[in-house]
Structures are given as structure tokens and as C-alpha cells.
């Protein structure tokens, strides 16, 4: 029996889509200084008000959305919102707190350098002193922060970061903004997010900070508060002008982290870092990219999480089988079909594919949303791969797209060998690469015919860990054997389940009724074949035959891989 224990048909998970939609909320934040008026954004005059009144903010723009912020006289943020533009018009009315101080306030609207600004005056509200002996409760000021409409229509829950920031400079003169989040306010926000109607979506709390372009940002979060909220399935969305990190708290093993530090949860801080890479790192990335026929677009950025407590630190780099979503914004000319996000390994200089989707904005920039089950340094690469021996039109575009995204390789720089057979080890390696998984040679130790030094040992081990493969009953994997179409269907079905976070599937084999050779499909593979056919990933060899035992070619494997990656939202 081959690849026994095949997965059942996957039910399309919505969680990854939630992550992807959340990350699309990220955009450049208008600068806090030097308000050069823009030709694409205008702002109407704003009337003077008394604290506690509604402030009317209106304007026009050619963008899809504008970011609106209002600054107090001391330049702190009193209001922050991402506002959609409809038929060229936008509006962002808000009620200014009755406790706000008097003075001149500034409204800024736009994206990046394309901004417009206006000032208006606020008259402080006269407060009548309470009768002698009574106790008055001050009215709190509105909480500054980025207001985002979450998936499901729930009210956004934003945490105030305005009074918890400090700035440090490293030995290279690089500035880092440190945001130390107040535990009580974060706990309240997480509780509020969990209690409201999220329409089936995960509760989300947003923590946003507007820093200067190129600055590093470190969010210090209270470990014990996050630990208490993990059971709620909450997500903390951390946002800066450089990038966004959407962290599902369930990926962290809080008890194991505390044990490794030898510290009580209340004394531990979790540091989430969003750091643009330094010039020397980008220089090395450019050299590595050139060596594989690619070029770097913009600079790299590093996302990392460090737990600190008990005089120790522990860097958290792996999140099991859960993808964590991130977003960056890139300018310049980008062809999404020839571009990808790549992970950079500082130890080896290697660049590897990361699942990503590119969304072009009306101002010409790209929102790039990518996901991976670990942390590292990430960059955007562009390549234009082509192979002289790719003449079949049904495969050429798909093969060259995946080659440009660093997913498939040719047998040489100029040749792909599309009609050659593909082995079981080669296809497992392709799936591992498509999912953005790290090699794990230890995972292949259970196979008697996979040597630890084999080129495919790391990919095979990663495939075992992700439950993409199981091998044969005699304990072998048969890495050099050519893969059959039904074996490929089983691996693909399992890869779909992994990408969607599914642990259980349902199956209907009705889609196999059109194949007159359906009885030749092994019982262990039938559900997976049905799933792959239903998803449009695998089709018949002819209109009415599947030919399950036929060996797949390299071109066929690449086409199926591309369909799978689009189906699982790993590429556009």
C-alpha cells in the first residue's frame, strides 16, 4: 500500500483569510511633520469647536483610502483612523473629548508623502466645580491609535501607546522606539475584544505606533496578560510605519517559555520587534539575490519575538503548524508574477520562498501580505526566469512563474526538462518549499532509506513533521521512485489541510464518477484524489480517465503545484 492513511477532504478554513484581510488594513502613515500639500488629497477647512463637540473632517482624494489623524497642541495624537474614499470623497467625523485642552489642533490626511493638513481651534470646556464634599470623576481623553474596522463588523479595539514610548540609539546611531504597554489597559482591551460580537472571527486588539521611516520599533508586552488571553483565541495586531505583525496568542507556549526562563509569568516581558535591516545586511542580500538571478526590491525587514525574565532571554522563532501573518508596503515597479517575499538566512546567505500575496494600491505602492510559521529576516525579490526547453503553452507560464518565485528550479539555468519524471523526494521537496517550511533532517530519521546527508533529507523530514508523507509499511520512503498521480494527490490533499490549519476533513467521491477507471484508484487515495479534482488542482489525463498509476512529469507537477498554491492562498 502506498502513502497509507490519506487525509480526508479539507473543509476550507477561514482563519487564514481573516489573517490576510487583517493585514491588508496596513498602509503608510502620513508623516507628523513637513505637511507638503498633495495634488491627490485635499482637506476642507475644519471649524473651531469646544471640547466635547463633534469635529467634521471632509475632503477629496484619488486614493482608495486615506489615513486621518488629529494632533493635539503638544503633537500627541487625539484621533487616528483609516477612512475609505467613495466616489472621490471621504469623511471622518469624530467627537473630541470634553476633557481635551484648549489650543490649536492639526488635522493630517493622506498616505505617505501625499498628505493635506488643516488646523482648527479647540476651546477647553468650562467645568463647574462639584459641591463641597462630593467626588468628581474626570472624563478620560479619547485613546489615540489606529482605528481599523475588523473582520465581521465588530468595533475596533485600540490600545493607547501615546504615553508609553521611549527612544534609544544603538552603537551605530540607529534609533529604536520602545513601546512599553500598560498591562491594565491591554487586559481591558483584550477582554473587550473577546466580549463583543466578532461574527465568528478571532478577537483582535490593535497596537499601533507611527515612527519615522527606517526606525526600529520594539513593543514590550506584559507576558502574564497575554497568557491569560491566549485561551480566548485573541490576536494582537502590532503596527508601525514599516510593517505589521498579526500575532495569534495561541501560537505561544507560555508555560514552556516561563519554565525556560525560570521566572514567574508576572515578571516576564514579551518583546516584539519590527526592525528594518541595516545596510550591511541589505548588501549581503543583494549579493545573494544576484547569485540566483534575482534582484532585491527595497530593504529587508526583520520580525522577531524575545521573552525576557529572570535575568534571561529566549528568542521565539518557531510557531508549530500555525502561520503568522505580516505586512510590508513597497514602492516602485513590481510585477507580482515575477516577485516574491523571501526569507534570508544570515548564516548561509540562502534566500527561500515565503507564501505571499501582492495587492497594488491606487498610489502605485504594493501591500505585501506574507505568512510563515516562524520569524526571520524577510525581503522582496524580483526575478525573470525562463527555460529554453519549455515549449508547451499549458505549462510554460506556470513553470516560469514558480521559478521566478524560487519555488521550482530547472535542471540547469537554461533547461527545465519538462517531460522528465519527478521522484517522490523531489515532489515532497516542492511541497515543503511551497508551504514555506524550514528543513528538518531529524524528521526523516524514521525512514530506513533516507540518509542524513542526502540532499532531500531536510525536506523529507519537514514533510514528515507537517504530516504530508508517511511512506511505506516496510519503513521506507522510496525517495528515488517516480511519483504517481494518485500519490501526488495524497500529498497535495495533506498540504491543503496543513495550509488551512485543518485537522479533520469530509469527503465525497461523486466527482470521480466521470472517470471510467475510478476503480483503479487505490482506496487509500480515493478521498484525496476526489478532493484534488474538486479543487481543480488535478484533472484527468483525458476527459474520462484519471490514470492513477501513471508517472507525473516535472511540467505536470509544477502546474499542479501552482494550482494548489493559489487554492491555498499561498500566492496570488
Image (cartoon, rainbow, N blue to C red):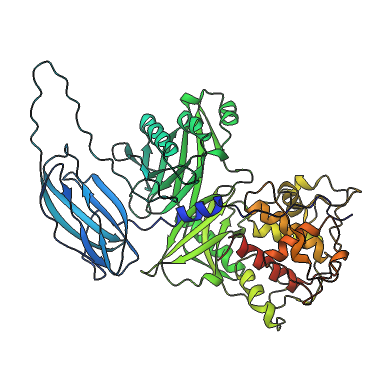
Q: Is residue 486 left or right of residue 266?
A: right
Q: What residue is shown at x 72% (from left), y 82% (from top)?
A: 389
Q: Position of residue 346 (x, y in %)?
A: 58, 52
* Front residue of 498 and 480: 498
Going by the image, does 455 lie left or right of 95? right
Q: Is residue 211 above or below residue 182?
A: below
Residue 464 spot, x, y in % from top left: 76, 49
Which residue does the image show at 10% across and 38% down from the upper left? 125
Q: Quadrant of the C terminus?
A: bottom right
Total labels: the figure holds 0
Within the image, what quadrant is residue 38 found in? bottom left
Above or below for 561 versus 345: below
- Camera sees residue 484: yes
Coordinates of residue 44 in the picture (x, y in percent): 16, 62
Answer above or below: position of 337 versus 182.
below
Q: Nearer the viewer, residue 215 or 283?
A: 215
Q: Quadrant of the N terminus?
A: bottom right
Residue 423 in sight here: no
In which quarter of the view is residue 562 placed?
bottom right
In the figure, 167 relative to 121: above or below? above
**Which residue sits at x=23%, y=55%?**
33
Question: Which residue is most to the top?
Answer: 133
Q: Position of residue 316 (x, y in %)?
A: 56, 40
Amino acid at each position: 500500500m502506498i502513502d497509507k492513511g490519506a487525509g480526508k477532504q479539507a473543509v476550507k478554513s477561514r482563519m487564514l483569510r481573516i489573517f490576510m484581510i487583517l493585514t491588508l488594513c496596513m498602509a503608510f502613515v502620513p508623516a507628523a511633520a513637513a505637511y507638503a500639500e498633495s495634488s491627490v488629497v485635499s482637506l476642507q477647512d475644519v471649524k473651531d469647536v469646544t471640547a466635547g463637540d463633534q469635529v467634521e473632517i471632509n475632503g477629496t482624494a484619488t486614493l482608495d483610502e486615506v489615513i486621518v489623524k488629529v494632533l493635539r497642541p503638544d503633537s500627541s495624537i487625539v484621533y487616528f483612523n483609516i477612512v475609505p474614499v467613495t466616489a472621490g470623497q471621504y469623511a471622518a467625523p469624530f467627537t473630541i473629548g470634553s476633557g481635551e485642552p484648549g489650543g490649536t489642533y492639526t488635522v493630517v490626511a493622506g498616505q505617505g508623502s501625499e498628505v493635506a493638513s488643516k488646523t482648527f481651534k479647540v476651546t477647553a470646556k468650562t467645568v463647574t466645580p462639584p459641591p463641597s464634599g462630593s467626588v468628581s470623576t474626570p472624563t478620560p481623553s479619547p485613546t489615540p491609535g489606529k482605528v481599523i474596522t475588523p473582520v465581521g463588523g465588530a468595533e475596533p479595539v485600540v490600545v493607547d501607546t501615546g504615553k508609553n514610548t521611549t527612544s534609544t540609539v544603538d552603537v551605530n546611531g540607529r534609533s529604536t522606539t520602545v513601546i512599553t504597554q500598560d498591562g491594565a489597559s491591554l487586559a481591558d482591551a483584550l477582554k473587550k475584544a473577546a466580549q463583543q460580537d466578532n461574527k465568528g472571527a478571532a478577537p483582535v486588539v490593535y497596537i499601533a505606533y507611527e515612527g519615522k521611516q527606517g526606525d526600529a520599533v520594539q513593543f514590550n508586552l506584559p507576558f502574564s496578560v497575554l497568557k491569560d488571553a491566549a485561551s480566548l483565541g485573541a490576536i494582537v495586531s502590532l503596527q508601525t510605519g514599516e510593517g505589521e505583525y498579526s500575532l495569534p496568542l495561541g501560537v505561544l507556549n507560555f508555560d514552556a517559555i516561563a519554565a525556560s526562563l525560570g521566572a514567574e509569568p508576572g515578571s516576564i516581558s514579551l518583546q516584539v520587534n519590527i526592525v528594518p535591516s541595516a545596510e550591511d545586511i541589505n548588501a549581503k542580500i543583494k549579493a545573494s539575490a544576484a547569485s540566483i538571478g534575482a534582484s532585491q526590491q527595497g530593504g529587508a525587514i526583520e520580525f522577531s519575538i524575545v521573552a525576557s525574565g529572570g535575568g534571561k532571554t529566549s528568542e521565539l522563532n518557531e510557531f508549530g503548524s500555525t502561520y503568522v501573518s505580516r505586512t510590508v508596503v513597497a514602492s516602485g515597479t513590481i510585477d507580482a508574477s515575477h516577485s516574491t517575499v523571501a526569507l534570508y538566512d544570515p548564516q548561509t546567505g540562502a534566500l527561500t520562498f515565503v507564501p505571499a500575496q501582492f495587492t497594488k494600491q491606487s498610489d502605485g505602492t504594493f501591500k505585501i501580505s506574507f505568512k510563515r510559521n516562524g520569524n526571520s529576516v524577510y525581503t522582496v525579490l524580483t526575478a525573470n526566469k525562463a527555460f529554453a526547453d519549455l515549449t508547451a503553452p499549458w505549462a510554460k507560464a506556470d513553470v516560469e512563474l514558480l521559478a521566478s518565485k524560487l519555488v521550482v528550479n530547472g535542471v540547469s539555468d537554461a533547461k527545465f526538462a519538462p517531460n522528465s519524471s519527478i521522484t517522490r523526494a523531489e515532489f515532497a521537496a516542492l511541497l515543503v518549499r511551497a508551504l514555506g517550511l524550514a528543513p528538518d533532517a531529524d524528521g526523516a530519521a524514521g525512514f530506513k532509506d533516507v540518509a542524513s546527508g542526502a540532499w532531500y533529507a531536510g525536506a523529507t523530514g519537514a514533510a514528515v513533521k507537517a504530516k504530508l508523507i508517511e511512506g511505506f509499511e516496510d519503513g521506507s520512503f522510496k525517495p528515488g521512485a517516480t511519483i504517481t498521480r494518485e500519490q501526488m494527490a495524497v500529498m497535495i490533499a495533506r498540504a491543503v489541510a496543513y495550509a488551512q490549519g485543518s485537522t479533520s476533513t469530509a469527503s465525497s467521491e461523486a466527482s470521480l464518477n466521470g472517470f471510467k477507471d475510478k476503480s483503479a484508484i487505490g482506496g487509500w487515495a480515493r478521498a484525496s484524489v476526489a478532493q484534488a479534482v474538486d479543487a481543480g488542482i488535478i484533472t484527468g489525463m483525458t476527459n474520462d480517465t484519471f490514470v492513477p498509476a501513471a508517472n507525473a512529469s516535472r511540467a505536470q507537477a509544477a502546474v499542479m503545484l501552482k494550482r494548489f498554491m493559489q487554492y491555498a492562498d499561498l500566492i496570488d
